[in-house]
Image (tube, rainbow, N blue to C red):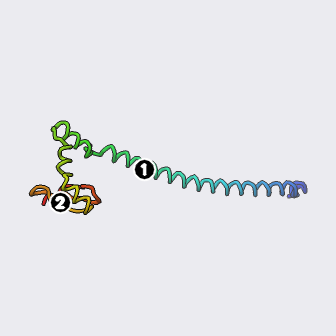
Amino acid sequence: MWKSSKTNRMDPQKFKGLQVRKTQLESELRDLRDQLKELDKKILYVNSSLSRISKEMNDLNEQQPTISEHALLRYVERIEGVDLEKIKREILSEANIKIISQLRSCKLPIGKKYTLVVRNKVVVTVEDC
């Protein structure tokens, strides 16, 4: 079959333009893929953070009520009527203050059944003997 020579002829200017456009699109595609990778990383991070926060919220929601040591002391003092200042004076008697000042850390008997545990001049607990 006979074809026109015009249709078989390559237009160098058009071909060059198409090559430039192809290179631009390939570069744009690479950039988009890189952006997609970064977005995937961000999505993973945000999902992980959301999961952690949801778990923490759930744990807090399921947590049983507790009582602070301060609340216990105020209860004993105000409702039970225990004089905490009197107890402090008994623990830090003049004799105990002298011993604690000298030894800094020690165990002091208090009564027949208990021991004061002192660390760095602070009475930290009362133990059974």
The amino acid on which the numbered mark 2 sits, given as a three-letter code, is Leu
Residue at point 65%, 53% (across, down) = 32
Q: What is the number of callouts on the image?
A: 2
Disc 2 and disc 1: Cα gap in Å? 51 Å
Q: Are marks 2 and 1 in contact (CB under 8 Å)?
A: no
| Quarter occupied by residue 38 | bottom right
Q: Secondary structure at mark 2?
A: strand
Disc number placed over residue 108 in the picture, else none: 2
Q: What x and y, as percent, mark residue 29?
A: 68, 55
Please identify the quadrant where the N terminus is shown.
bottom right
Q: Secondary structure at mark 1?
A: helix
Amino acid tagged 1: Ser
Among the two numbered marks 2 and 1 on one chain, the one whose residue lies closer to the N terminus: 1
Q: Is residue 18 left or right of residue 43?
A: right
Question: What quarter of the picture does the C terminus occupy?
Answer: bottom left
Which numbered dot is residue 51?
1
| Neighbourhood count class around disc 2 (C-alpha, 10 Å): few under 14, some 14–19, many 20 upward | some
Residue 14 spot, x, y in % from top left: 85, 54
Q: Is residue 107 left or right of residue 9?
A: left
Give the x, y percent position of residue 4. Answer: 89, 55
